[in-house]
Amino acid sequence: MVDRKKVAVIGGGVSGLAAAKAFDERGHRVCGFERSHDFGGVWELSRSYPDVQTQSPKDLYCYTDHPMPQDYPEWPKGPQVHAYLHSYAQKHNTARLFRLNTTVKTMERRADGRPGWTLTLEAGAQTWSEDFDFVSVCTGQFSEKNIISHPGQDDFVARGGEVMHSSEYTDPSVCAGKDVVVLGGSKSATDIAVNAAKNGARSVRLVYLENVWRVPYFVGGINFKRLLFMRAQEQQFNQWGKSPLQRVIAAVLKPLVWVNFRGLETLLKTQLKLKKHNMVPKVPIEKDVSCSIPIVTPGLIECLDKGQITPVLGTFDSYSKAGLKLSTGDTVPCDVAILAVGWKLGVPYLPQEFQEKLIEDDGQYRVYRLSVNPDLPDMGFVGFNSSFCTVLSAEMIANWLVRFADGKLSNQPSAGEMNQNIEMMLNWKRNERPAAKIYGGLCSAPFHFKHFDELLADMGATKKKRDNPLAEQFSYPNAAAFGSYLASTEQYQAG
Ligand SMILES: Cc1cc2nc3c(=O)[nH]c(=O)nc-3n(C[C@H](O)[C@H](O)[C@H](O)COP(=O)(O)OP(=O)(O)OC[C@H]3O[C@@H](n4cnc5c(N)ncnc54)[C@H](O)[C@@H]3O)c2cc1C
């Protein structure tokens, strides 16, 4: 018999909605808290910059039981994703479980000594504390802006210049007739640079530290989901936990794999004209692939070709009356500086003593299956396993986490087993996955299938693969199929 728990879900984005549904479905009493006025997280409308669209194709960015509408484009726009998330909440009557405009300020162990946590909550002028038996942390990786400034910024703003974080770029008219400089090389940086160029900016410069591999929506004319998301492709990357036989096979196939990746690089260099624009990355593509690999913004190459966007390898040095001085030594004209410098990964409401158990000195997180830390009982993360199909990843780990909390995993791990696995994974990330440094390694891509295989095995799924072995090897993760695998795990009710 599983005890019915009072469960807090912090955050009402993709992950919070998945977690609330998973715990509610098992009969727990769910109390969700979202600090914004609306659901959606990064897709909430006031946080989305113009023209934002998914990087993932729509059938790779959906919950298992709720495909995106047929009339949505292959890569839905931000407001469409937002509407989709609302329709999911409506379908499962999830909104009733949440309090909006409510911020979790702190999380402490319960004063009564019982398992669980006491949350301090704030809604408007009201502050109160509440005890929970379990906490599902779903606050994402994009909740705290990375704020940076450069010498001379205050005077630049006093003279009428504008400096904003990428998430504040919601009105393209700020760029009309202006000299715009975007700092950063991520997808949001190129999205904003293209949007500014198309909305009448006098000049647009894209200033970034290093070239990275970018993937176009169509590689050599083929939708990238058909090339880059296959189990067969995933096995070519250096995975963790290989058996001796898998190591031998990998050694034998190494030359073929090398040729495959060099072929892909050549294709990308040609299609994206990377040499012409001095944008060829130094790192081999197989070392670079992680959640941070950007998809090419539509129109980017055309804007580069026409000189509407000038790429500059470097960073900002300082603002002056003459313009914006870059680390290259050049001073460029600038009226609007847009800092696409990302977000601070963290769990700020968790006191320092617990953060120390969770985060290593190099920023890597100690989380088993990218969800739980053995020294922080009665809590787990949903969304730390982000990927190229984050909605499915969130739903998978939410289902895993409720079973973990209830002691209902087929492979319920001991603290010792979790620590051993965490050490193995950290060692692998530090030595084999330099790209994992970004986001502290909280990304399951490009190992979607391997990660999901582990979760399904833990949950005791009796069905874990498609019947057709060819489809299983050469097709992308199918959300509906994963729904059937989840349905093959033990279905139980708490209370
Ligand atoms: C522009 C953009 C495009 C993207 N495109 C893709 C894509 O195509 N494919 C893909 O897989 N991923 C994509 N991502 C990654 C995206 O972050 C995930 O897909 C997913 O939306 C993350 O959802 P989440 O619920 O984990 O986090 P979030 O969406 O960040 O939601 C976290 C929520 O927690 C709330 N919160 C934070 N702190 C507190 C607190 N203390 N108290 C209460 N509430 C709190 C926040 O307000 C927020 O609503 C994209 C991200 C961005 C920014």
Image (cartoon, rainbow, N blue to C red):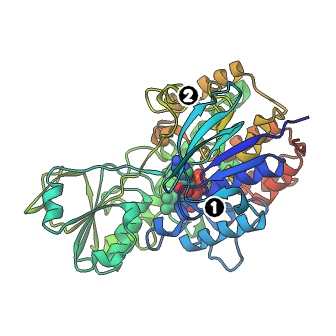
The residue at the point 61 percent across, 56 percent down is 12
The residue at the point 86 percent across, 38 percent down is 460
Q: Is residue 195 positioned above or below 330 on the image?
A: below
Q: Which residue is mark 2?
A: 426
Q: Which mark is residue 187?
A: none
| Residue 196 locus on image (x, y percent) | 33, 73
Q: Earlier in the sequence, mark 1 or mark 2?
A: 1
**In the image shown, does 5 or 210 lie closer to the viewer?**
5
Q: Amino acid at mark 1?
A: Lys
**In the image shown, does 349 or 422 lie closer to the viewer?**
349
The residue at the point 53 percent across, 60 percent down is 36
| Residue 392 locus on image (x, y percent) | 69, 54
Instruction: Tell me the CA gap for discs 1 and 2.
Output: 29 Å
Circle 2 packing at 10 Å, graded few (<14), some (14-19), many (20+), is: some
Name the side, left or right, on which 224 lies relative to 310: right
Ligand 1 shows up in the quarter that is bottom right
